[in-house]
């Protein structure tokens, strides 16, 4: 982490978990053990049906509410989709875009990810843009080229000023939900590559200001080591974000001096 230049963000991604009543219960549990967030911002990205409950449940805590997806059009005949304006009106601050599960199961591409990034920014939301490689791609030795391409595609047409509002989350697909975790060195190498890519696109000053998260099975046991890397500014947390105690342990790791 480098708090001098950029914000540390610990964000939970609940995926398709928890009902509205379970969301309220989690907020109560978290409030009982939540530390004062000295240096990091805490975000909980919840299923769309839980957003209103989450906004109300977390309102007295220093926790921002995020969404897990949005559509790139403002309105229209897109049954089942949710626009950036709808999320903003509810009080949502962040939105996850291009998660590997969205790419794998719902056919999202670098092109649709870019459209969603623009839609989120136009609505006044902060996109958490996910990039990362599969195990096969890592074994082929194309991790760096692939991740750089994903970053460039996601940010295509985004102004330097708006890039400051973006968060990039490196999520090695082979480490999501598998119990495997990239070593701190592996994670740091790719996060540094992401910052270098942003520097080539926008210059050093902008690159220094962008928060880059690690999103591959960060948990209490490895959070401190991962967050000690200079270009890892937080985490996009999956399973550990569903348990208040584990989530707080990761928040505490981000608050260490």
Image: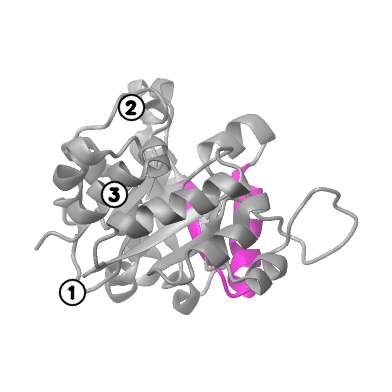
On the image, numbered disc 3 is attached to which residue? Answer: 191
3D distance between C-alphas at marks 2 and 3: 16 Å
Asked whether 84 or 165 is in front, the reply is 84
At horizontal 33% and vertical 62% (from top left) the residue drawn is: 211
On the image, numbered disc 1 is attached to which residue? Answer: 4
At horizontal 12% and vertical 59% (from top left) the residue drawn is: 256
**Percent x, y for residue 155?**
51, 61
Compared with 204, 234 (above or below) is above
Mark 2 is surrounded, within 10 Å at the Cα level, by few (under 14), some (14 to 19) or many (20 or more) other residues, namely: few
Mark 1 is surrounded, within 10 Å at the Cα level, by few (under 14), some (14 to 19) or many (20 or more) other residues, namely: few
On the image, numbered disc 2 is attached to which residue? Answer: 141
Question: Farthest residue toward the right?
Answer: 77
**Percent x, y for residue 74?**
77, 67
Quadrant housing residue 124: bottom right
What span is in magenta? Answer: 109-130
Mark 3 is surrounded, within 10 Å at the Cα level, by few (under 14), some (14 to 19) or many (20 or more) other residues, namely: many
At horizontal 39% and vertical 70% (from top left) the residue drawn is: 202
């Amino acid at each position: 982490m480098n708090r001098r230049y950029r914000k540390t963000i610990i964000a939970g991604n609940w995926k398709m978990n928890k009902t509205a009543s379970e969301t309220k219960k989690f907020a109560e549990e978290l409030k009982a053990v939540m530390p004062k967030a000295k240096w990091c911002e805490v975000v909980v990205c919840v299923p769309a049906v839980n957003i209103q409950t989450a906004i109300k449940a977390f309102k007295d805590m220093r926790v921002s509410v995020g969404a897990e997806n949005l559509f790139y059009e403002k309105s229209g005949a897109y049954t089942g989709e949710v626009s950036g304006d709808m999320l903003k009106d509810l009080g949502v601050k962040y939105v996850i875009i291009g998660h590997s599960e969205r790419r794998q199961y719902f056919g999202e591409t670098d092109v649709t990810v870019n459209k969603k990034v623009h839609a989120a920014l136009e609505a006044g939301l902060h996109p958490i843009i996910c990039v990362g490689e599969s195990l096969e791609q890592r074994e082929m030795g194309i991790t760096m080229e692939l991740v750089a391409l994903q970053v460039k595609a996601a940010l295509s047409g985004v102004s330097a000023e708006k890039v400051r509002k973006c968060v990039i989350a490196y999520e090695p697909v082979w480490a999501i939900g598998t119990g495997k975790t990239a070593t701190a060195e592996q994670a740091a190498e790719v996060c540094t590559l992401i910052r270098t890519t942003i520097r080539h696109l926008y210059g050093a000053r902008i690159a220094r200001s962008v928060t880059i998260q690690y999103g591959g099975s960060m948990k209490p046991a490895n959070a401190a080591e991962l967050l000690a890397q200079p270009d890892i500014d937080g985490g996009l947390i999956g399973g550990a974000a569903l348990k208040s105690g584990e989530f707080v342990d990761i928040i505490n790791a981000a608050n260490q001096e």
